Image: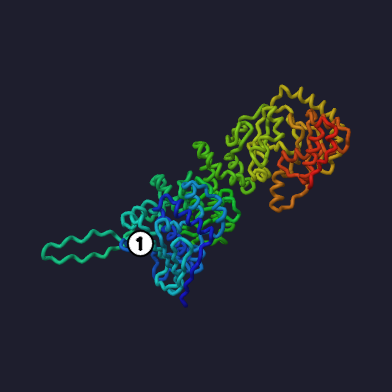
Amino acid sequence: MEAMSEEMKFEAEVSQILQLMIHSLYSNPEIFLRELISNSSDACDKLRFEAVSNADLLESDPDLRIVVGFDAEAGTITVRDNGIGMSRDEVVENIGTIAKSGTKQFLESLTGDQKTDSALIGQFGVGFYSAFVIADKVVLQTRRAGTEASDAVLWSSDGTGGYTLDSVTQQPRGTTVTLHVKDEHKQYVDHWQLHSIVKKYSDHVTFPIMMMEQLPPPAKPKEGEEPEEPKTPELKQVNAASALWTRSKSDITDDEYQSFYKQVCNDYEDPLTWSHNRVEGNYEYTSLLYVPKRAPFDLYESMAPKNGIKLFVQRVFIMDDAEKLMPRYLRFVRGLVDSNDLPLNVSREILQDNKIIDSMRRGSVKKVLSMLTSLAEKKPDEYKDFWAQFGNCLKEAPGEDPGNKDEVAKLYRFDTTHTATAGELTGLDDYIARMQSGQDKIYYITADSYSAANNSPHLEIFRDKGLEVLLMHDRVDEWMMGYFNEYDGKSFVSIAKGDLDLDGVGNAVEDSEKKAEKEKQAAEAAPLIQRIKTVLDDDTSDVRASTRLTSSPACVVMGEHDMALHMQQLLKQAGHDMPATKPVLEVNPSHPILELLDREQDDDRFANWSKLLLDQAMLAEGGQLEDGAGFVKRMNEMFMAMQPDPDVHSVDNTVEP
């Protein structure tokens, strides 16, 4: 084919990420070798899998391997594999572009903290570019298995503005990466250094990692003797190349588990916890599942990978992100499952409605939930960190996995009125243990922030009675509670929806007296409430005396099955059409504002103040006013009416919409 040479530029954001990584993010430069070996291992895995259905791809070289070498005189390090290799288009896609999407979100996720940002780099998937931490030039030459020798590609870059692509001829398939090492990192151009790094980070790569043996210098010849011919060094395997998950748990150290996690899952931190299990019975499989310490920046992106579970069949790698092996709400779990029962030519289509996969999925979910339960019980501080990172994922479980929702619910943690500040979380079992006399329901409120939930007027009667309320303020909470009706035989009740019946619950000593007083006040306020109801007939489904309020003048109450106002607002902003819902306005007959309203004889002013009462109640609930200018105008009129000088009322206080 005709030789092709192209000069190509990195996108601006890609260059920015690359420079950040090279100059500030990687505090441990030796991990470059782990990253390159990991890429080579993936290439060998992919070839082994494709060769199951097309043995010709192995050509005349069936023994897959990785070779690490160096040239002290030239100052270079090479990592070579005989895996699947890449075509020209694949080089541009996989090497020429750091990421297909999410670059902007990644840059926004950077904190300036070196350790934190190093972890983010790993999650972003730019491991190949770690080579530039120690090299001022990187050259990659590759040929995809099954293509002609003349289809090979040479990629080179100095890590600044772009890269060069050339067509070359290469007989063996696979990829060779050559690093031209910077002067300040020449200590890595050494057999012992490279050997040590391989053993430290890549010992459990399942393909042999080879290096030229280090031969002693030839003995000095005695006088009159001919010098010995230098021996030709042979390739020696330097890694264990064993599938760690096939070994007995008792034979594996924590350091080995952690090292394996970093290698397989491309993380720069140790995992938070892990579970290693061998299952025997109708189906036989082994799982090694990890929970990371930190959530990736794109965990909640819809196009992000659903999970990080690798599927193996009889120790042969089959596919990354086998989404059928783990539900989406556990997409943060990393690791692998190795089946003895699936065929080697398994495809994603075969995995649909597969009994073996279903069995492995059920077992894996059970192990993850058990692992998290143990963490919560034995290491509550670490579990608190886990919840901060991944709790919102677990809240997706009631809608996705009804069969396990009770077990998942044991893991939930919420803010509550029982504590003074945000972040002092409680579990549902602890809430139930603190229930008041006569209480058989779990009370909660959803809002768009902790402050909005904690300051809601709906809480007033609950604080008065000493009843604890869960403060839910994550976006997923309103959706979650649509699927989460009860726990441990106790029904959930939103204190901001439907009718509220607290008779005999909480502070019962004062119930009868307070109830009689409120009934009297409601009866006396009936004409006023009817007057307000007439004014607000188009905007409310009802106006009634409140049993919730003790110090606020009014609140809005949604129907039992209606969506909270703050969620309606979010969905509207996202472009969704929302059905029209009218809230109930509850008023507090004992509040001074209601007394002022009752004395107002001017119908127009009464109407404005009634609307103002509804507006402020809507705002407190997280809603958005349709007529913000009208609200401001009514507020101004109210302030002006409070002035002692009657002439002030003639001032024009209209507000332009």
> What's under tag 1, amino acid-wise?
Thr
Figure check: 590 above or below 398: above
Residue occupying the point 85% across, 39% down = 535
Q: Position of residue 130 (x, y in %)?
A: 44, 56
Figure check: 48 above or below 5: above
Residue occupying the point 68% across, 29% down = 463
Nearest the eye: 399 or 90 = 90
Please tell me how crowded label 1 is: few (under 14), some (14-19), or many (20+) other residues with Cα within 10 Å: many
**For the view shown, which residue lies furthest in the bottom direction?**
2
Q: Position of residue 406 (x, y in %)?
A: 61, 41
Figure check: 387 above or below 244: above
Q: Is residue 374 visible?
A: no
Figure check: 294 above or below 137: above
Q: Report the side of 547 relative to 177 (left or right).
A: right
Q: Report the side of 4 relative to 73 (left or right).
A: right
Q: Position of residue 39 (x, y in %)?
A: 44, 59
Instruction: Check disc 1 and report its element: helix, strand or loop.
Output: strand
Q: Report the side of 207 relative to 375 (left or right).
A: left
Q: Position of residue 301 (x, y in %)?
A: 59, 53
Residue occupying the point 77% across, 26% down = 515
The residue tagged 1 is 76
**For the view shown, which residue lies furthest in the left direction?**
224
Q: Is residue 139 visible?
A: yes
How many circles with numbers are drawn on the protein?
A: 1
Nearest the eye: 57 or 246 = 57
Residue occupying the point 42% across, 71% down = 59
